[in-house]
Image (cartoon, rainbow, N blue to C red):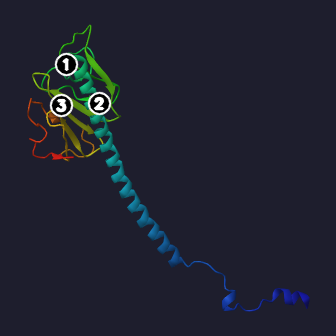
Amino acid sequence: MFMRQALYQAPLRDDDKSKGFTLIELLVVIGIMAILASIALIMLRGQHVIAMNSAALSDLNTTTKHEEGLYVDYDYYGSTRSNQNNRARNGKGDAVAGTGAVYLVTRQNSSSNPERMEFRLSENVRMVVAMDNTYQSYVITAKHTDGDRRYCYDSDSGAIYYDNRYAAGTQLTRGRAVAAQLNRDDCARIGTMSPL
């Protein structure tokens, strides 16, 4: 008799039912989590591009300080050169990348005694520093390869401009850089550029 009582179970009442999730409830929760994850991914992608643009802008500001230091030391601004022994030239300098040392070289240099400022760019930032023919004015064009903004700084105006003409993944080349002319805001003359 005792054995029969142990095997017998009383019918479940409403308050005795096990508490759990139905399949529908689980699917709804998974769907909501998928939507939130996709929104977060889109926001993170946008933040990545913003961070790359900030790296290019930071390097542009650093290069401006090096240009001014070069002027204090040698009374001339310099253009970017990938090789420290190359002479600076007016017009556009080399399109240099953040893979090592980058040089700003004045016109008064030689292969045995180059007058230069040496600095490093952030990884994947490309930059061109152009000078006018008097070596008294310069324009810096900078872009991060993964960023979507090309920045431009002209020493004549002291203003920074940007445009979104080149999409993320596009590298800055010498041909995509801005040329320099004395006593003219070269960045403002480009129709796609807006002041920062």
Cα–Cα gap, marks 2 and 3: 11 Å
Looking at the picture, how far across and down is residue 110, in whole percent? Answer: 22, 10
Write the residue at 31% across / 22% down: 118
Looking at the picture, how far across and down is residue 154, in whole percent? Answer: 16, 35
Write the residue at 27% across / 33% down: 126
Find residue 174 and name its label.
3
Residue 158, above or below 18: above
Q: Is residue 80 left or right of residue 9?
A: left
Q: Is residue 20 left or right of residue 34?
A: right
Cα–Cα gap, marks 3 and 1: 25 Å
Q: Name the kind of residue labelled 1 in the image.
A: Asp
Residue under numbered circle 1: 75
Write the residue at 91% across / 91% down: 1
Instruction: Kindly state the secondary structure of the residue where label 2 is placed.
Output: strand
Q: Name the kind of residue labelled 2 in the image.
A: Ala
Work out whether mark 3 precedes mark 1 in sequence or the reverse, and give the earlier one: 1
Packing grade of label 1 (10 A; few <14, some 14-19, many >=20) is: some
Residue under numbered circle 2: 97
